[in-house]
Structures are given as C-alpha cells and as structure tokens.
Image (spheres, rainbow, N blue to C red):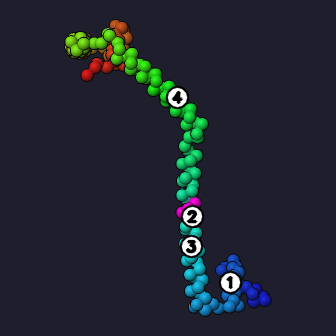
Amino acid sequence: AQQGRIREKAYGKQKIYFADQEQLPAASDAELRGLDAQIAALSGQVQALQQSCRQMEAELKDLSSSMTTSEMAKEIKELKRDCESYSEKLGRMKSATNHVTPEEKEKVCSEQKLYCREWRRRKRMATELLDAILEGYPKSKKQFFEEVGIETDEEHNVVLPA
C-alpha cells in the first residue's frame, strides 16, 4: 500500500486492501466487445457441456438401474417356468369334470343371502335385548358383557357380508 500497488480503505476498525486499478492498462471498446463475445461463446460451451453431462448422467442412471444380461436370462427362465406351471394348472381346470352348474351356484348364493339376513335379524334382536337390560344395569356395557360371557362380532373382527 505504501508503494502504491494496492489501495487501502478503512471502515471503522477494519481495513480493506484491493488492487489499484489506475495502474492497470485501460481496455478499448473493441477489446471489451471481443472479451464479451469470448465470454458469451465460452458460456454457451459451458451450457452445452452441462447439458451433455446431464444427459450422460441420466443415461448412466438408466443403465445402472436396468438388469444385466445374466439377470435377464434368469428372469426369462423363471417366467417361462411360471408360464408352464400356469398352463398346466389351466389345462387341469379345463379338463376337470366337477364343474359347478349355474343351478348349484344360484342355490349356494341364495342360501348365503338367507343366512346373512337371519344373522342380521338375530344380531339386531340380541342388541335390542341387551340394550334393554343395560338400561337398569349399574355397571358399564363392557363389564356386563364380561360377567355374562358375551362375545361380539367386533371383538373377533367379523363383518357381515354385503
């Protein structure tokens, strides 16, 4: 700073040193335009290289996440085995002689509907009866169920079919 090559500025207790730009040669407008053009060209190259790098990274990610040739061969063998077993199973199902007739199916479905209706009706009757008993019962519903030994559908995660 004493020789004049750098300058010093004091901000309170701090001092900042920087190059004395008056000693540097002044650039002409043509040189500045040339440097700006060079900066723009280099910036374009940087952007092109960054784009290329992103594309290559994406391709690398795709390739690293895909299966190798040996893994693919194993997968194909397993899928062919599965396909054969399913074909055999389908053949056995088609050749089976114990098919359910539509009449039998309809009979089973109607029986299920009948039993579900009866289940709902009996559950509703039991609930109404228990509610009537609980009106005059001094303890809680849970305590009453434990004393009497009542198990509900909800305790066993049983749901009525729709």
The dot on residue 78 is: 4
Secondary structure character of the magenta stretch overall: helix
Q: Residue furthest top?
A: 148
Using the image, determine if residue 71 lies above or below residue 14. above
Q: Is residue 87 above or below residue 18?
A: above
Pointer 3 residue = 43
Mark 3 surroundings: few (<14), some (14-19) or many (≥20) residues within 10 A: few
Task: Please give left or right for residue 13 compared with residue 137 in the image.
Answer: right
| Kind of residue sitting beneath label 3 | Ser
Q: Residue 55, position in %: x, y?
A: 54, 58
> Element type at marker 4?
helix
Q: Name the image quarter holding residue 135.
A: top left
For image coordinates 58% across by 51% down, the residue present is: 60
- Characterize the local packing of mark 2: few (<14), some (14-19) or many (20 or more) Cα atoms within 10 angstroms: few
* Residue 9 place in picture, x, y as percent: 68, 83
The image quadrant that residue 157 belongs to is top left
Q: State left or right for residue 86 relative to residue 108.
A: right
In magenta stretch: residue 65: no
Q: Which residues are magenta?
A: 49-53
What separation in Å lies between label 3 and label 4 (alpha carbons)? 52 Å
Which residue is identified by label 2? 50
Q: Earlier in the sequence, mark 3 or mark 1?
A: 1
Mark carried by residue 121: none
Residue in view at x 57 percent, y 64 percent = 50
Is residue 98 in view from this perspective? yes
* Mark pair 3, 1: CA separation: 34 Å
Asked if the residue at tag 1 contacts the one at tag 3, i.e. Cβ–Cβ closer than 8 Å, the answer is no
Seen from the viewer's position, the closer of residues 116 and 57 is 57
